Image (spheres, grey):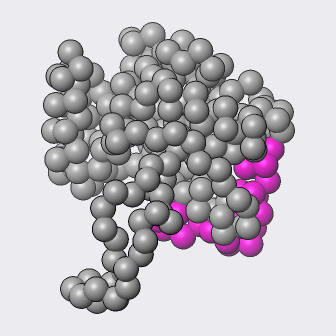
Amino acid sequence: MNVAIIIAGGVGARTGQHVPKQFINVLDKPIIVYTLEQFQASEEIDAIEVVCLSGWEEILKAYALQYGIAKLKWVVPGGGSSQESIFKGLTNLQDECTADDVVVIHDGIRPMVEQRIIHSCIQVCKEKGNGITALPVYEQIFKTEDGETTEEYVPREKLRILQTPQAYKFGTLLKAYQEAFEKQIGIHASSYANTLMTDLGNELYFAEGSTKNIKITTGDDIEMFKAMLLARG
């Protein structure tokens, strides 16, 4: 079984809106619904779990009913951070998934994820144990200590930009989160499943990414998303 775990627990203060960013309407549809529709359409996804901002669970369920998200099986209240939300999502599936089932972690605010991206990360996971959506870096990258001057050039050939979706074997990821929270490893503020796994010494494998797979964080991102939808027609 392949289960999509959609992380939608954020408040989204940086968008400048009064509504959590995943519930902002763009062209008369909430952002989270665009995301869910992509996983609903995937032939490789058997079920969907949403880890939702607390207090918005019933609204999410109503949207799922309205827009035909029939694969939605579980809605779980989110935690205080992305890592807590992922852990809560995994814990909720303990009696639903086997160790070899694939869980696909995805940001609820990446609504432009394409079918080929979902397919790629699942296939890499089945072949190698995990599959992390990644992109090459095309710009020049420098390290800086003070934020004003260059310190060191970093060869871009050695860099990748990691996105979601990220696919893992359920048993491996659950065990990693249990260890990480017990030992307080890899759960710092900006961390995610991929950084936690790396902090615990696991090797990750890259899957196909896309520059269209934007993460909606600011008001400018919303405008870009709207333009992409209009261009798609």
Which residue is pictured at 70% across the width and 39% down the height? 125
Figure quadrant of the C terminus = top left
- Closer to us: 107 or 201: 201
Residue 167 in the image: state x and y as whole percent: 64, 40
Q: Residue at x 43, y 71 (%)?
A: 155
Does residue 79 appear left or right of residue 210 in this picture? right
Quarter of the rendering containing residue 53: top left
- Position of residue 174 relative to residue 122, above or below, is below
Residue at 39% in and 57% down? 137
Viewer-proximal residue among 121 and 34:
121
Relative side of 228 to 23, left or right: left
Residue extent of the magenta highlight: 171-191
Which quadrant holds the N terminus?
top right
Which residue is depicted at the point 65% across and 50% down? 205
Image position, residue 136 (x, y; %)? 43, 53
Residue lying at the far right of the rendered structure: 99
197 lies above or below 39: below
Q: Image height check: is 212 above or below 180?
A: above
Based on the picture, tell me whether residue 184 belongs to the magenta stretch. Answer: yes
- From the top left corner, tell me how far across and down residue 18 is, in percent: 21, 45
- Looking at the image, residue 141 sits to the left or right of residue 37; the answer is left
Asked whether 49 falls inside the magenta stretch, the response is no
Residue 137 visible at all: yes
Q: Which secondary structure dominates the residues rendered in magenta?
A: helix
